[in-house]
Image: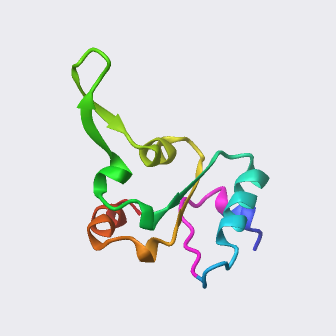
Amino acid sequence: MHVSRHLCSSSLILSIGPTSATSSTMARGIAAKLGRPFAEFYAPLARESRDWFGSKGLDSEGKPRWFESEFVRAISTEGAVVLIDELNRAPSTVLNALLPLL
């Protein structure tokens, strides 16, 4: 099976392997081969749900506003290849919020 043919009709791929198993390289290569945008997130660095989804704050005029995270922008980008690296090392609170999306 050609990976690129499969990716045209699929939205999720789970790659499991030891550290340095080239998952990142494979994801970058798939994005490049298909001409799609690529975004990479290292799960252990995001300690709270707001790191993944965004947070409330004030805009330049002092008005309340929701600020989307880079992750939300990435998954909202049509056709993007989004890599979440080391998901198994993310805190359980983050996993509980993130896994329903996957």
Expressed as whole percent of the image width and height from the top left, the position of residue 40 reads 57, 56
In the shown orientation, is residue 58 left or right of residue 25?
A: left
Quarter of the figure that contains the N terminus = bottom right
The quadrant holding residue 23 is bottom right
In the shown orientation, is residue 25 left or right of residue 93?
A: right
Residue reaching furthest top? 61
44 in relation to 82, above or below: below
In the shown orientation, is residue 48 left or right of residue 16?
A: left
Residue lying at 78% horizontally and 54% vertically, measured from the top left: 33
Quarter of the figure that contains the C terminus = bottom left
In the shown orientation, is residue 16 left or right of residue 91?
A: right
Residue lying at 43% horizontally and 67% vertically, measured from the top left: 44
Expressed as whole percent of the image width and height from the top left, the position of residue 19 reads 61, 80
Where does the magenta region start and end? Answer: 7-16
Residue lying at 34% horizontally and 62% vertically, measured from the top left: 47
94 in relation to 54, above or below: below
Residue 34 covered by magenta stretch = no
Near-viewer residue (6 or 88) = 88
Expressed as whole percent of the image width and height from the top left, the position of residue 41 reads 52, 58
Magenta: main secondary structure equals loop
The quadrant holding residue 20 is bottom right
Which coloring applies here? rainbow
Q: How many labels does the image show?
A: 0
Near-viewer residue (8 or 58) = 58
Residue lying at 53% horizontally and 41% vertically, measured from the top left: 77
The quadrant holding residue 65 is top left
30 in relation to 96, above or below: above
Expressed as whole percent of the image width and height from the top left, the position of residue 70 reads 46, 44
Near-viewer residue (26 or 52) = 52
